[in-house]
Image (spheres, rainbow, N blue to C red):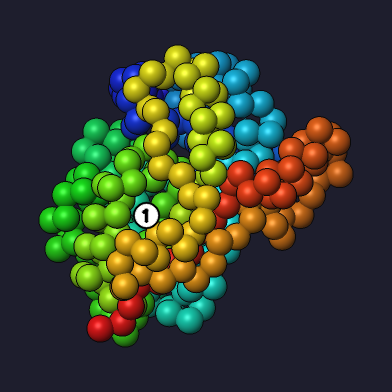
Amino acid sequence: MNKKSELGSQTVQSTMLLPLWGRATASEKNPEILNDKEAIEIIKNCNYDFSSIAKTFGEFGGICYIVRARRIEDTIRKFIQKHPCATVVNIGAGLDTTFSRVDNGRIRWYNLDLPDAIAFRQKFIPDPSRNTSIAKSLFDISWFDDVAFHPKDGILFISAGVFYYFKEEQLKEIFKAMAHRFPGGELYFDAESRQAVKKSNRMVQKTGNKGAMMYFYVNNVKDIEEWSPNIHAVACEKYFEGIPANREWSSGIRFMMRASDWLKMMKFVHLRFSDK
């Protein structure tokens, strides 16, 4: 059954198609890193021309998407080993398929995204058991009340490719509010350096999307700790660290991975909120 994208092409929400394409195409070639069967199936059933995305981002771009998904999955698995009944909130869920690969049969999962993005998501990924979609903006803090939170069970917030699109002051305020409302919680997300964000903006513009400019970057994770005494940096990790290399990758791709980590262009940030 073909389902045509109804998202506007000049919106941040439409960028959810980029990681979908990346996970589907790159996981077929690199299943040892990520085996995203759902993304592959969605691509087959989605009446959308991905040729422009493929041309712009290429093989390295696809690898970046599966590495991001893998690193987030690994973090979730470690968290739910300690907290098997944890709550996981996927901020800016888009067409993410992580739940199906990490579910232990006990966690509670929430997909938070804007109303049109959630409506689009549910055409392809209906909410399974213990899943709840919240059709609200990240900055509409009424979503706090939609999340069942039991401090003893733990809560982990994840976000992939989302925070780039907001101004630092916006994120500062919502991080502070989350830290106050969800004491003991943790937040894991990807980020880029200031220079990398400039480069990413040029690439996104090549796809024709002029409405998804990126603003937020992380050069020093300690700067985020200064936002609130309740926010603590657990780690700032190299993007490709610990990822198994595929022998079929070109020398150019291997070089870009090493250069990215050496220059700290892309990274993963892990924060923890103070207990009350």
Q: Residues within 10 Å of mark 1 (few under 14, many from 20)?
A: many
Residue 16 falls left or right of residue 53: left
Judged left or right of residue 219, residue 130 is: left
| Residue at 29%, 54% in the rendered image | 172
Q: What residue sits right under mark 1 in the picture? A: 90
Q: Nearer the viewer, residue 134 or 28?
A: 134
Dividing the image into 4 quarters, which one contains the N terminus? top left
Q: Along the horizontal axis of the image, is 192 left or right of 116?
A: right
Q: Is residue 131 visible?
A: no
Q: Quadrant of residue 236?
A: bottom right
In this view, 173 is above or below 92: below
> Where's residue 186, x and y in %?
39, 69
Can you see residue 181? yes
Does 79 appear above or below 32?
below
Q: Is residue 234 above or below residue 129?
A: below
Q: Quadrant of residue 274?
A: bottom left
* Image location (x, y in percent) of residue 220: 51, 56
Q: Secondary structure at mark 1?
A: strand
Task: State the residue at coordinates (21%, 70%).
Answer: 181
Residue type, numbered disc 1: Asn
**Which residue is at the front of the view, 274 or 6?**
274
Q: Relative to 82, is 226 on the left or the right?
A: left
Using the image as rendered, state which of residue 199 and residue 186 is in the foreground.
Answer: 199
The residue shown at (51%, 40%) is 194
Q: Where, quadrant-wise, is the C terminus in this rendering? A: bottom left
